[in-house]
Amino acid sequence: MRIGELAEATGTTARALRHYEQAGLISSERTANGYRVYDELAAVRVRNIRHLLAAGLTLDDVRVFLPCLDGDVAAVPPSDAGLRVALDRLAVLNERIAAQTEARDRLEAALRERTHLLGP
């Protein structure tokens, strides 16, 4: 299937697919006129990539899951490496949330000191 067909079948964009290909997560063959052509298994792989991205992982994180991207990623127990990547990503997200919460609290306190907009 061509890139537009794969994008439609997986609910993504051609741009995202080119990005996944550049990252080494999917591959295509080229026709004589330069069009990208993907096999049917690419749709499964793209859906799995999107599932992992939606869970908060990055494309770099997803590389660890390459051996199982052609199956049902959600149904298979994660490998030790996959668990390690997920735990590391969770720690990063928690650090970012904590930093943002602190920034919000500082801003809120500063506004309270200087205005009556936020109430008591």
Image: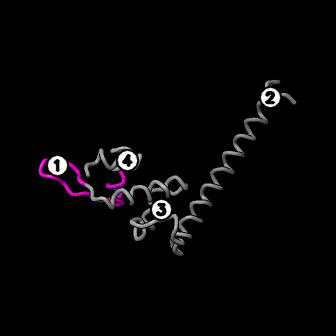
Q: Nearer the viewer, mark 3 or mark 4?
A: 4
**Nearer to the camera, 67 or 40:** 40
Helix, strand or loop at mark 3: helix
In the image, taking residue 119 as reference, residue 55 lies left or right, namely left
Q: Residues within 10 Å of mark 4 (few under 14, many from 20)?
A: few
For marks 2 and 1, the one nearer the N-term is 1
- What's the residue at 74%, 40% (across, down)? 106
Q: Amino acid at mark 3?
A: Asp
Q: Position of residue 56 (x, y in %)?
A: 55, 55
Determine which residue is flagged by label 3. 61
Residue 16 badge = 4
Q: Quadrant of residue 113?
A: top right
For marks 1 and 4, the one nearer the N-term is 4
Q: Position of residue 19 (x, y in %)?
A: 35, 50
Q: Nearer the viewer, mark 2 or mark 1?
A: 1
How far apart are the two marked residues, 3 and 1, measured between alpha carbons? 30 Å
Residue 34 badge = 1
Helix, strand or loop at mark 4: helix
Q: Nearer the viewer, mark 3 or mark 2?
A: 3
